[in-house]
Each structure stands twice: as structure tokens, then as C-alpha cells.
Image (cartoon, rainbow, N blue to C red):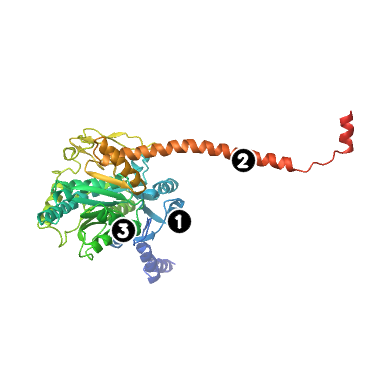
Amino acid sequence: MVYKLIFLLVLIHSSFNTPINNIFRKRSVQTKDKFCLITIHDSNSSYDKNFIDAFNEIGTELGVDVEIKSNIPEGEECYNAAKEFAESGCKGIFADSFGHEEYILKAAKEYPKIQFAHATGTLAHTEKLDNFHNVFAKIYEARYVTGIAAGMKLNEMIKNNEIKESEAKIGYVGAFPYAEVISGFTAFYLGAKSVCNSTTMKVRYTGSWYDEKLEKEAAEKLIDDDKCKIISQHADSQGAPNACESKGVPNVYYNGENTQLTKSYLISQKINYKPFFKIFVENTQKGTKMNYDYTGSLNDDSVIVYKASSIAASGTQTAVDKAIEDLKSNKTKVFDTSKFTVGGQKLTSYKADVDTDENFETDTEAISDGYFHESEYRSAPYFDIIIDGIDSIIEEEEEEEEEEEEEEEEGGKNNNGTNNFYRKEKNKLSTGVILAILIPCAVVLIAAAIVGVILSRRASAPVSAPSESTIQAMKI
């Protein structure tokens, strides 16, 4: 009996070392966590390609599975995509476009055990959910640095008698007149002006983050109509760079390098999302609580400035390297208020809309210690000031602006970005007044039409003869 018991124990012990058991153990160890990405476009968009590449690289480096859904609109489709990912076992879900935020937030509330993150959003620091985060980077640092490269190129043109000082104009193709775009082109302009004081800038908006045709047309107008000598962009296609290449105009690119455009590529910058993705994956796996907002910078390699090309002015790379070090050490502040004016005046105070609400009310003092504290109170930009020296144009308003420019000249006003800002506000007000008049009128007309139809039908309806009982009742 004792021998049988010993034999049984040996048999049980040996069974744990059988090949089949080892296979099951190995499979358990090899099971990978899955992380998922939602993008508004696909890899044809330089913006989305930047996210897709970084996400795939982190998946490989950290040994996790990644799944990507591209071309997801900023609507309920985003929520549906997030829900499908959540139900499929994703540990963390990331979306890359501003308009995705409300739908990602909705999913985060529905799936509290899954981590969600969103680029360029504004709500995480006020929603305060442990599983919902916003991420962006101080790309304005890189814009400032590449602006220096642009300014040095203008100086070279002036020195070579290719242009006059008064012709040192930069063109900028922007998607929308949002703070994210305004912050970027203002930093670019300030960088250029720091080395070429006569620099001015013209901005044309396309009304789209990704439209190659519109971006190309905007760049061509900046070159041909506005006589801009260098073009940069905050838009996601090759439209503007290709226009520059065909016309031999230097271009400062965004979201990667463009070295294949040998006649025009000057320098570029991008946001590197790998540092955040690494934190997102590792903290999610460990169950470590993350900040509501993550703001990357030059200091953590979340902001990248590429090497200047061969068409850059002599000494550009040395100047670029020094500017980067000065920003990293806080020696330089991009939005130093002593370096720009608004309406001819220095700014000493500015209330920014940091805690986003439905009415977009300003709530946070953004200027102190002599500079505007961009992306320090939340990750997404909130610098939305049009400073002197920058003229921004919304295409549909251009004809009206030309008429108003004549009025401004008569009144002795300087046609700068500040006046454009007030003009936009006036246009909004005019639109509101027109709608306030038209909508009630339309309601009255529709109601009158409905009543007319009802009366018409009643008048045309056949009248039946009264019944015998009805006649008798009438007699009584």
C-alpha cells in the first residue's frame, strides 16, 4: 500500500513536467497585452503617419500587440471604434484627433478599467478621470527654432540682393484659426524675427487638417499673390511642400523630413509621441496612476528638430543647436512678452481659456514673469493672440477684408493681425444678427403655409347631405 502511494506521488509530480504542460505554461507567458490606436486619416497624412509609426515602434520595443483603426471620423464612429477595441480586450486606447475627444471620453466613462488617452484634447484636467488622459507637446519650441533657420535664409537672400529687407515675408499655410495653429505660427514668426528684424508673415487657412489641393493652392497664393519668400505649414499633406518645390521656394516642413524635395526643403520638426506611448503602455501594465495631462518638450525628446538641409544659410545648424540648448535650459522663453506687441502695445496680462467650457470663457492668467506660459496649465495650446507683424486671412473673408483695408488706411490704422481678429468677431456678430432675423421669419412663413394648406383642404372637402335624424334634430 505504501509503495502504491509513493508511486502515485511520483507519477503526479512527473506529470507537471510533461511537454503538454510546458506548452500550456509557455502559452500563458507568451500572451501579449493589446494596445489600440484610432486615427482620423491614414498614413497618407503626415500627421497620422507620425502616430502610426510611433505606435508600431513602441509595440515592437515593448513586446505588446497593437491594433489600429484608420480613417475614423470625428463623430459617433469614433465611439463605436473605441467600444469595439474595448470589447476585444484592449488594455489601452488612444485617439489622435481633436474632434475625437468627446467620443473617447464617453467610452472611458463606460469602460473604467481600460485606459484611454487623446492627443490635443482639453478636458482631462477638468474631468479628472483616472482612466482618461490628454497629451500634447511644446511643438512651439521647435517652431521657434525652425523659424530661426527661416530668418537666416531671409538674411542670406537680402545679403545676396535677391530681395530687399522690406520683402522679407514668410508665408504660412494653416488648417484652422485655432490656438494650436496660432501658437505654432506665432512661435515660428518670433524665431525668424529674432534674427531678421524686418520679417513679416502672411497666414492663409484652408479650413481642413488634410486637403492636398487646398494646401497647394494656399501655398501658391502666398508665393504668387502675397510675394512670400519662404513657406511653412500646419497642415498634413504634401500640398504646400510640392508647391514650393515646383516654384523653387524654401519650405519648412512639419511631421517628418522631406529631404526628397531637394530644391525646397530647408528644415523640419515634429512631435515624437514615443515617450508618451512608452509611459502609457508601461503604466497601464503596472496599474500605475498617470497624470491627467502629459506635456512633452525638447527635454524629453517629445519635440524633434531635424538637421538643416544643404540649401540652408551658412551657420544655420550651429544657430539651431544653440537655440535648442537655450530653450532646454530656460534661457530663452518663446513667448517673451518683450519681444512682441499687440495693437502696438506690450502685453502685461492675458486671460486664457484653459478650463474649457461651453461658453469658452477665459479663466486663467497666462502671463507672468515676463512671458506667456503656453502649455504649462494644460497640454493643449491656448495661445490664441494675433500679434503685430502677422496678417492672417480666412479665404471667404478676403474680398471683404480688401474693402475694409481701405477704410483702415483712411483711419490711420495698421492692418495687422489684431485688426483681423476684431474683423472676425464683427463678422460673427453680423452673422448672428442675420440669423436672429431670418429664423423667426422662416418659422412664421412655414406656419402660415401649413395653416393655408389646412384651410384649403377643408374648403375643397365634399359636403355630404345631412341625414334624416340630423334634419329632425334641427327641427326640434
Tell me if I can see residue 143 in this picture: yes
Counting from the top left corner in percent of width and height, residue 205 is at 32, 50
Q: Which-is-in-front pick, marks 2 and 3?
A: 2
Which residue type does callout 2 highlight? Answer: Ala
Does 174 sit above or below residue 59?
Answer: above
What residue is shown at x 41% (from left), y 47% (from top)?
A: 108
What SS does tag 1 mark?
helix
Q: Which-is-in-front pick, marks 1 and 3?
A: 3
Q: Quadrant of the C terminus?
A: top right
Q: Are marks 1 and 2 in contact (CB under 8 Å)?
A: no
Which residue type does callout 1 highlight? Answer: Glu
Q: Nearer the viewer, residue 153 or 133?
A: 153
Q: Which-is-in-front pick, marks 1 and 2?
A: 2
Q: CA distance from mark 2 to mark 3?
A: 48 Å
Counting from the top left corner in percent of width and height, residue 28 is at 38, 62
In the picture, the disc for residue 216 is: 3
Q: CA distance from mark 1 to mark 3?
A: 37 Å
Q: Quadrant of the N terminus?
A: bottom left
Of the two numbered discs 1 and 3 on the same chain, state the one appearing first in sequence. 1
Q: Are marks 1 and 3 in contact (CB under 8 Å)?
A: no
Q: Nearer the viewer, residue 320 or 273?
A: 320
Counting from the top left corner in percent of width and height, residue 115 is at 37, 50
Q: CA distance from mark 1 to mark 2?
A: 47 Å
In the picture, the disc for residue 139 is: none
Q: Nearer the viewer, residue 66 or 361?
A: 361
Direction from residue 263 to residue 402 in the image, left or right = right
Report the residue that reaches farthest toward the top: 476
What residue is shown at x 38% (from left), y 60% (from top)?
A: 67
Callout 1 environment at 10 Å: few (<14), some (14 to 19), or many (20+)? few
The residue beneath circle 1 is 84
